């Protein structure tokens, strides 16, 4: 017998309101038999089926552009580290198509720091980051 799902599950619960959650799970077919022959109630699967039948999702919706792996998002802000360094992360260097060993000239302005990428001939190329 397959376990009840959706509207059938909700109907079964409404018809048997006086029963406990464990008894309802057994009636709905959310049981399994262990190797030793004991009957076991799958409460988590039962509760998940109830949530799904009521269109309730406990997992957050993925934002547009968010990958499968999750992780951090680029905030386009950096802080001076404890040792005084500024660290630009992989997300930014990948986005700019930079390779290890790429060199920059640092130009310090009144309210900004400008990185000018140097090509092989050591002439500054006007690329702002």
Image: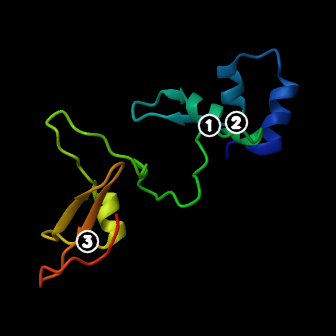
Instruction: Give the residue drawn at x 18%, y 33%.
Output: 82
Residue of label 2: 51
Q: Which of 93 and 3 is in front in this view?
A: 93
Name which of mark 3 and mark 1 comes first in the sequence: 1
Tell whether 50 sits left or right of 73. Answer: right
Report if the CB atoms under discs 3 and 2 are less than 8 Å apart.
no
Q: Distance between the residues labelled 3 and 1?
A: 39 Å
Q: Name the outermost residue toward the front.
A: 110
Query: Where's residue 27, x and y in %?
Result: 72, 30
Name which of mark 2 and mark 1 comes first in the sequence: 2
Q: How far apart are marks 3 and 2 (CA)?
A: 47 Å
Name which of mark 3 and mark 2 comes first in the sequence: 2
Residue of label 1: 58
Q: How far apart are marks 2 and 1 (CA)?
A: 9 Å
Q: Tell me the SS state at disc 3.
A: loop
Report if the CB atoms under discs 2 and 1 are less than 8 Å apart.
yes
Residue of label 3: 98
| Quarter of the image with the C terminus in it | bottom left
Q: Tell me the SS state at disc 2.
A: helix
């Amino acid at each position: 017998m397959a376990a009840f799902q959706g509207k059938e599950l909700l109907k079964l619960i409404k018809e048997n309101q006086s029963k406990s959650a464990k008894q309802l799970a057994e009636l709905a077919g959310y049981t399994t038999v262990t190797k030793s022959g004991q009957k076991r109630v799958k409460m988590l699967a039962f509760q998940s089926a109830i949530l799904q039948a009521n269109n309730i999702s406990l997992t957050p919706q993925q934002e547009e552009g968010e990958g499968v792996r999750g992780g951090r998002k680029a905030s386009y802000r950096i802080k001076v580290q404890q040792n005084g360094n500024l660290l630009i992360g992989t997300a930014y260097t990948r986005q700019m198509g930079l390779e290890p060993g790429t060199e920059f000239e640092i130009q310090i302005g009144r309210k900004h720091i400008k990185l000018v990428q140097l090509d092989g001939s050591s002439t500054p190329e006007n690329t702002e980051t």
